Amino acid sequence: MNETILILGASGQIGNELTEKLRTIYGNQQVIASDIREGNANMMEAGPFEIIDATDKNTILKTIKKYNVTQVYLLAAMLSATAEKYPQKAWDLNMTSLLNVLDLAKEKHIKQVYWPSSIAVFGPTTPKENTPQKTIMEPTTVYGISKLSGEFWCNYYHEKYGVDVRSLRFPGIISWKSKPGGGTTDYAVDIYFKALEEGSFDCFLSENTRLPMMYMDDAVNATIQLMQAKSEDIKIRTSYNLAAIDFTPKEIFTEIKKHIPDFTITYKPDFRQQIADSWPSSIDDSEARKDWNWKHQFDLSTMTKDILTNLKK
Ligand code: NAD
């Protein structure tokens, strides 16, 4: 595989682990990490790192030329909860960065683009359970509006200019190596840290709020599998529904309690409850499973064991 990859927004929750995995596959020097802030020590030492603002097209282009980059993974974004506080900034970052990268692909500076969408493209009028690939999409958050518009820009650049852009509608991503960056599903990461550090957790969602989720290992594997699939197998150029598990705060609490019997929880829903209530509780991802053979590996129980074992170390 002769690819040189540039990751924009590499220092965040997903970038951190995606960079590490891509470097093991393509080689450390073939994967250029970049962000507006430095990444962790491992990222900075293992391979090239550049400070790049994803809204600055010229700097992206200079870096593409400097390293002969063939693929860009665009992860820089403002996430759901933060975007509700800074709507204009979120729109500017989420849209400008995407149009920059799509234009660079249209101008043939790069061959392939990855850009994650989100379950936030759905809204309160979307069927909540087993949400289909094609359905009513009326998002009520700034983040959701930016992701839905982004999906249709991706499709437009593919149809009109032949750009090879690929996308996944990520559910909430759960990790232990890096902390999340301002989303509505962040509680499902914090809960593990608090269970071990304090033995108690204040949850900002109510106990029966069911949301689609995925362990980081599965999210990273899905991304790489999608990018390595043959172009003709990618039938959807907006963004693929993607699913693994779904659970409520009460269910993840009960699962953790099996390992930490004294663990306690209280529920204090805040403004994020309204965002969560507008999203699906489970996702039908049969198109991804059919088109490029997607399979998840982790369920709630195996993920919980894996996270607690690693955090205890
Ligand atoms: P994150 O907030 O943890 O990381 C985003 C990174 O982008 C940060 O390191 C930040 O410094 C960087 N950034 C911010 N502004 C920038 C700019 N102008 N130029 C360059 N970098 C900039 O987010 P994440 O969870 O890693 O999300 C990555 C992508 O996945 C985003 O598009 C997000 O919408 C999507 N996504 C994430 C989740 C999730 O649960 N984490 C779910 C659905 C979709």
Image (cartoon, rainbow, N blue to C red):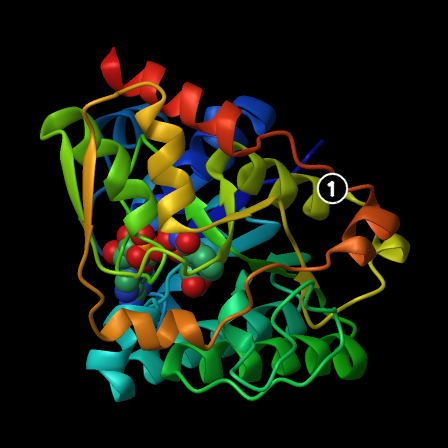
Check the image and report above or below for 275 versus 225.
Answer: below
Q: In the image, is 84 to the left or to the right of 258?
A: left
* Quadrant (top left/top right/bottom left/bottom right) for the N terminus: top right
Q: Position of residue 311 (x, y in %)?
A: 27, 20
Mark 1 close to ligand 1, CB under 8 Å: no
Q: Position of residue 124 (x, y in %)?
A: 52, 83
Front in this rendered view, residue 262 or 239: 262
Crowd around label 1: few <14 · some 14–19 · many ≥20 (10 Å): few
Front in this rendered view, residue 61 or 87: 87
Front in this rendered view, residue 212 or 2: 212
Q: Secondary structure at mark 1?
A: helix
* Quadrant (top left/top right/bottom left/bottom right) for the C terminus: top left
Residue lying at the far left of the rendered structure: 198
Q: In the image, is 33 to the left or to the right of 106?
A: left
Q: Position of residue 76 (x, y in %)?
A: 37, 61
Q: In the image, is 293 to the left or to the right of 135?
A: right
Q: Residue at x 40, y 77 (%)?
A: 143
Q: Which residue is mark 1?
A: 228
Q: Residue at x 64, y 61 (%)?
A: 167
Which amino acid lies under the numbered mark 1 shown in the image of this protein? Gln
Residue lying at the far top of the rendered structure: 313
Q: Position of residue 186 (x, y in %)?
A: 30, 52
Q: Residue at x 82, y 57 (%)?
A: 287
Q: Is residue 272 visible?
A: yes
Q: Quadrant of ligand 1?
A: bottom left
Answer with the quarter of the image where residue 129 lies.
bottom right
